Every structure is written in C-alpha cells, then in structure tokens.
Amino acid sequence: MSAKYRLICTQCGHDCGTFDQWFAGGQKCPKCGCARAEAEYSAPIPAPQKASTDSFLQKYFDILPLESRENIVSMGEGCVPIERYESLEKWALEECGVNCEIHLVRNDLSGGTGSFKDPAAAMGASLLKEHKAKRYCIASTGNSATAFACYLAKAGVACTVFTPKDASPDSIAQIRAYGQECVVVDGNYGAAKAAAANAAAENGWLICGGNTDPIRIEGKRTFVYELLEHFDGRMPDYYFQAVAGGTMPIALDKGARELASKGVKVDLPRIMLVQQDLCDPMVQAWEKAVKTGFPEGWEKDYPSIEPQTKISILSAGTPGMYPIVAPIVRKSGGTFIRIKESEVVPQGREIWRSSGIEFGPASIVCIMGLIKALRDGLIENGSKVLLNPGEGCSRNTAFKQEMTK
C-alpha cells in the first residue's frame, strides 16, 4: 500500500486509500458516498525550479498520485509558455488609464491537443494505464473530451465520449479520429452527463467525475507551482478565465491550500470568471448574491437556463459547480463578468489583427472579460494580470471562417 499519497474525502474526512481502492470502490467514499476526494502527499514541497519544457508529470512526479514514471503518458503538456501581452497592455494604458502587466498562458503551444484540459487528460491517462483500466467514459462539451480521447488512445485505454447535440463538429471528428467512440446525445450538456452516468453504471465503466474529479484536480493544481516559479515566488494579482464548470479555480484553490499546509503562504489571485450573455447562469447567480448581501446559503441559489449560445464548449446551462466555485471566487476577492456574445467575432478579428494569435471563441470570451474589467475600473494600477484563454481555434473551423470574412 502506497505511502506516497492518500485520497481524503472532502465531505467526511475518511481516508479512501489510493486510486486503486478509489476505482475499485466505484469512485466514491466508502463511508459517506461522496464522489469528491483530494490527495494528500507525504513528500515535501519541491523547491522552485527553472522553467522547462518537461511535462509537468515528470517535473512534479513526487507530488503526483503516480507510482512509476514508466506509466507517464505525455505529449509535452503542462509547464506552458506564459507571454507578455504587450498590445493589450498598451490598449489598457491608452484607453483606460491603467498601467498593468498582462500575461498570457499559451495553451495552444503546450503540446497535446492545445488546450488547458491536457494536463488533466495526461494525469488521467497515466493513472488509468498504471491501474490497467480498459475503458473510461466522459461527458463533455468539447475540449475535455478531445483531450481525454487523445491521451487515452495513447495509453491504450478505450474511451466513450458523450457530447451534447450542439458540440463542435470539429471536436467530434477529432475524437473519432483518435479511434475513440463519440456518442452525440439528443439534448444539452446535462443530457450528455446523464447518458454517460447510465452507460457507466450499466457496463461497469470508470467515468470522469466532472469538475471535482480527483484525477482532474490533481492534474491541474500543479499550475500553482508553475505560476510561483514564473512570477518569482508570488501569484499574479488577477486571474481571468471563461467558465462553464470551473475545474481550474478549484485546482488553484487546492494548490494554494496544499502549499499553506506545508508552511508556504500563497495568496490566491483575484479570480475573474467570464461568461457570455447567451449562457450566463453563474453571472446571474453572483449578481443576485451581491445584490442581497450574500445571505446564508447564497452559493446554492443559482438558475438553470436553456443555453442560446453558439459557443458550444461554454454551454452549461445548469451550473452545478457554482456552489463550490463561487465561494472560492469570493474568498479570492474576484468576481463574475458578463460579456456580449454578439461582439465575440468582431473582437476576435481585432485580437487576431493586433496579436497575430488565432484564438478560439472561448478564449475570446476570456480576453473580452479583461477588457470589460478594465473599462469598468476593476483592475488596479501596477497589477499583474494573467489570462488563461483555454485554446486556439484549430478545432473550430466555422469560427475561424467567420473571423476571416
């Protein structure tokens, strides 16, 4: 039995053992049935390292839930380049009077499938290979499914993906090109999740447990370590991301708490989460909480809407992660921001012209969130801002064609 790490139930604190026990026990706590657990590690916090092109699985192996490096499945993901976004800095100063540093996570240059879902997929593929899993299933609106399909194919693990009917045709085609099964559900993301859960129960498959799945959290929380190394021991002041579910904010919080437990104090950046107005249930819930003064139970009060958005990877109308994500946002001093979807394509053209980078639509939503925050006076002078835009537009040819008209 491994002493390297233990999975601890977040609800009752029960020691759930290692991933072999977690998988054998139906991916839930044997004591209370909770499907959320966090890994605690026996190894000390690693000393800061210089930036490298190594996979995060190699770099942070001692504080990841893997027993053998031989089981690492990697395509160079993680430890992604972070660049200064000088053209946007200039705009912020000239148009808004805000002098700030803006840094851009170049997920499109990080190997793998080119999205910030790759580290979680690499973690998942490595764990499933190590534990000799044969099949896995996942419900996704696009990026997670594509990443898991790719990495699991590399690991020799069959994957069945369930996507909603509005998923990008490019993503569906890519999943199938990896030799994995893709089931397009006649319904929204909620219907896809239900179909995946039913299939897993009927066939005895392992299943991705969504945004709080310990595989995904453990695969993403080392991003905190990367940021501290990049920014010389401190976190950026603001963190921006477009959001449908919210694994990365949960992972950032887990990484910061993990460091604190080892005596390293880390202040979370102000987490700024962005949604488009045609699918904005988290923003609606946050605005109500702010207006009513965050009454007891405010985090459980959120709407369920029918998305009208064309941005399929941001089409979660029932924000089941809001009760977990929103308190993290509040703790960090951040907020939720709404942008207009009708402005995404023209803004994408302008960003492409000024930066030369072909971002995907969800990435444009993220950048537009910063632009709105600057216009609304939410960014302080002298701040370091980090944009985690998600992905390029390689799997959204329709959006790329719109931008180039």
Image (cartoon, rainbow, N blue to C red):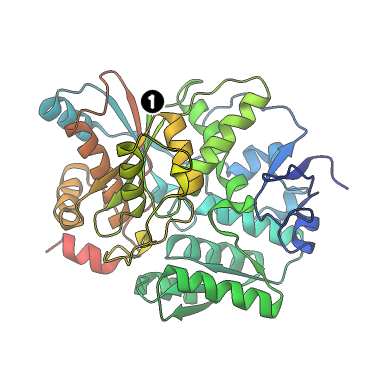
Residue at the image point whose x is 58% and y is 27% from the top: 49
The answer to whether residue 110 is left or right of residue 35 is left
Residue at the image point whose x is 48% and y is 77% from the top: 176
Whole-percent x and y of residue 138?
56, 67
Residue 360: tell me if it is visible.
no
Q: Quadrant of residue 174?
A: bottom left
User: Which quadrant of the figure contains the C terminus?
Assistant: bottom left
Residue at the image point whose x is 48% and y is 73% from the top: 192
Secondary element at image label 1:
loop
Residue at the image point whose x is 71% and y is 60% from the top: 27
Badge 1 density bin: few <14, some 14–19, many ≥20, Cα 10 Å: some
Residue 198: tell me if it is visible.
yes
Whole-percent x and y of residue 234?
48, 21
Q: Nearer the viewer, residue 123 or 306?
A: 306
What residue did someone put label 1 on? Answer: 237
Q: How many callouts does the rendering have?
A: 1
The answer to whether residue 372 is left or right of residue 195 is left
Compared with 133, 19 (above or below) is above
Compared with 249, 394 (above or below) is below
